[in-house]
Image (cartoon, grey):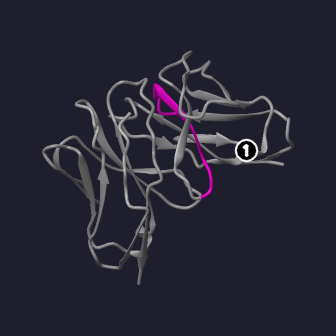
């Protein structure tokens, strides 16, 4: 199983860009990288998924270098409502592999 | 659109009692999962299912049993509850494998074992 390492916490201010990096040194060839967001007392919510290079959607961008041993979630112009825990997951297309969440990164956005 | 629904949302048990958590999804997803989340921690996979009639163990399966008799339902059972099982339980489902697709989560079931 690909183990992931993320910073425990990060602080930012409204309007800033936030980059959260995840390390996954033993990522397998068929593994994808997925990021989830979790607010208190709620289940995690899908943010973005990618395999290589760059992926962008309406809420975030995901940067994956050529060696795929790390990835960076980029949140442009964060607001107070982006205060949450962010999880990086690595997994492939084999259903019998368990998907582990790790401890995540607690992002605190201040006014 | 209900998505993933968990019942009950709250439950208090005494040590040794049994109970079943029900997860229902209306998205025709093949894959379903049960996670637990302890305070300040990430989610840990208990059991999962890759289709009707199948189940598999996750990271922390001891003390739990599951069944997937119908595609839309995934039941998590505690035969003899212990205080260490006090946690928030989340059910999730996905169309594709969790590594390739999007996990849809329920709102969680908060269980306290006294």
Q: Is residue B91 left or right of residue B16?
A: left
Q: Quadrant of the N terminus of chain A?
A: top left
Label 1 chain ID: B
Q: Residue at x 84, y 49 (%)?
A: B114
Residue at the far top: name it: B53
To which quarter of the image does residue B63 belong?
Answer: top right
Pointer 1 residue: B84
From the viewer's side, name the closer residue of A7 and B3: A7
Name above or below for residue B98 compared with residue A50: above
Q: Residue at x 25, y 56 (%)?
A: A72
Q: Is residue B83 left or right of residue B109?
A: right
Residue at the far bottom: name it: A111
In the image, residue A79 lies in the stretch drawn in magenta? no
Q: Quadrant of the C terminus of chain A?
A: bottom left
From the viewer's side, name the closer residue of B110 and B79: B79
Sort mark 1 into few (<14), some (14-19) or many (20+) by Cα contacts within 10 Å.
Answer: few
Name above or below for residue B91 compared with residue B79: below
**Region rendered in magenta:** B26-39
From the viewer's side, name the closer residue of A46 and A13: A13
- Image coordinates for residue B102, horizontal then vertical, percent: 38, 40
Name above or below for residue B100 compared with residue A86: above
Q: Residue at x 79, y 37 (%)?
A: B81
Q: Residue at x 26, y 68 (%)?
A: A76
- Image coordinates for residue A99, horizontal then vertical, percent: 43, 36
Q: Secondary structure at mark 1?
A: helix
Residue at the far front: name it: A25
To which quarter of the image does residue A66 belong?
Answer: top left
């Amino acid at each position: 199983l690909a183990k992931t390492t993320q910073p425990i916490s990060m602080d930012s201010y409204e309007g800033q860009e936030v980059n959260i990096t995840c390390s996954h040194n033993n990522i397998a060839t068929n593994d994808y990288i997925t990021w989830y967001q979790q607010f208190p007392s709620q289940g995690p919510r899908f943010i973005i998924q990618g395999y290589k290079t760059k992926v962008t959607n309406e809420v975030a961008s995901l940067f994956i270098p050529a060696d795929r041993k790390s990835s960076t979630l980029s949140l442009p112009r964060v607001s107070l409502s982006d205060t949450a825990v962010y999880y990086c997951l690595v997994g492939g297309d084999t259903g019998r592999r368990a998907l582990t969440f790790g401890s995540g990164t607690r992002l605190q956005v201040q006014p | 659109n209900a998505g993933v629904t968990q019942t009950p949302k709250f439950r208090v048990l005494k040590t040794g009692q049994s109970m079943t958590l029900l997860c229902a999804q209306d998205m025709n997803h093949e894959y379903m999962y049960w996670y637990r989340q302890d305070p300040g921690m990430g989610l840990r996979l208990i059991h999962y299912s890759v289709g009707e009639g199948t189940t598999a163990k996750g990271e922390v399966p001891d003390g739990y049993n599951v069944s997937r008799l119908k595609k839309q339902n995934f039941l998590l059972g505690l035969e003899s509850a212990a205080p260490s099982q006090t946690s928030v339980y989340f059910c999730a489902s996905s169309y594709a494998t969790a590594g390739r697709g999007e996990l849809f989560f329920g709102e969680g079931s908060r269980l306290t074992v006294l």
